[in-house]
Amino acid sequence: MTTTDVTKADPAAAEALLGRMFGAALGAAELLTIYLGDKHGIYQAIGTNGPITATELAEQTGVDHRYLVEWLQSQAISGLLTIHGTDVWTDRFELAPGVREALLEPMSPFYAGGLAAIVPAAGRAFPQLVEAFRTGAGVPYTAYGEEAVLAQEGLNRPAYVNSLTTEWVPAVPGLHDVLSAGARVADLGTGAGWSAIELAKAYPAVRVDGYDNDEDSISRARRNAAEQGVADRVDFEVRDISAVAAGQYDVVTFFECLHDFAHPVEALIAARTALVPGGSVIVMDERADEVLAAPGDEVQRFLAAASTIWCTPQGLVDADSDVVGAIMRPDQLRHLAEHAGYSGVDVLPIEHPFWRFYRLNP
């Protein structure tokens, strides 16, 4: 080692980074065990029948007994389950405090089950992503598997159920009155459809058309609408949003999707032309810092990592892509809106740790 190398060495910083990387590995491993528990209905069975032994739980779930014992042990050590004793083979297990709200109640504001699906989804696509870093090609959304749809549905639905019509809509001047009067709404990039469904449930006179180019998401959206009793007023279609009919809608929405699009300017043009005179375009997108702060806080770190392994690769599937990625700063959206023919962008007075809300003036 040279004198310069010794001068630059920083053991304390290296040790801190080692600890951080170990914590990240621990978190990823635990998320995978959580996904296994959710996928096989183990948490649900414990919540319904617990306290319960491994043998009883294996009978309830059909999960292999040996694997189940190992899983139960990991969950008890992780603090997600409570064990009544120390023998994982014979003692009883029950859910630890908070687990029911975070993992079993998808409409709870504390639901976090969608986070667990991110790891296997990214794992499915990762070989393609590694190659894409050399070639510059995109990685299609379908490469991430059904877990990608489950992750996005699980992460966004609680917010739509608990906040969309009770907090967000009232914060947009005049929007509540427009929806109450029977507006026609286009929900672009609708995914599994929960934003459209919650609007229809809260406003009986409204009609919502949800568009997305992912067939699995639209199939789930149609099923969700039927189960929620709004299929007569909410229609979902697999469609390129640039093909949305002109002059048809009072409100056009982009909920947490614009940054993923390969052609965001074209998407905004389609939204503007889809409006009737006096209509509104509402955008909910990531709450990236207004200017780069490095290093960033945990929210910004999550957005930046997700942009690298999820949002940007999916948007780069089109060869001439202009995808922004998850770091959608307000100035970036204003720039896109200006090129799409809007006269201005208003940042709406809605506080949220992950999302920022805009009204675009056509």
Image (tube, rainbow, N blue to C red):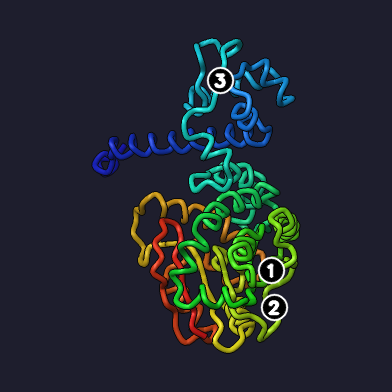
Q: Which mark is residue 244?
A: 2
Q: Which mark is residue 139?
A: none
Residue at point 48%, 27% (across, down)? 78
CB under 8 Å between discs 2 and 1? yes
Residue 229 position, x and y percent, is 71, 58
Identify the image quadrant of residue 140.
bottom right
Task: Confirm whether residue 188 shows in the render.
Answer: no
Residue at point 58%, 38% (across, down)? 104
Q: Disc 2 and disc 1: Cα gap in Å?
A: 8 Å
Q: Is residue 135 above or below residue 21?
A: below
Give the crowd class for mark 1: few <14, some 14-19, many >=20 residues within 10 Å. many
Q: Disc 1 residue type?
A: Tyr
Q: Which mark is residue 93?
A: 3
Nearest to the observer: residue 303 or residue 48: 48
Eye-nearest disc, 3 or 1:
3
Question: Which circle's residue, 2 or 1, is located before the other in the chain?
Answer: 1
Secondary structure, mark 2, is: loop
CB under 8 Å between discs 3 and 2? no
Give the crowd class for mark 2: few <14, some 14-19, many >=20 residues within 10 Å. some
Q: Is residue 216 above or below residue 275?
A: above
Q: Disc 3 and disc 1: Cα gap in Å?
A: 44 Å
CB under 8 Å between discs 3 and 1? no
Q: Disc 3 residue type?
A: Phe
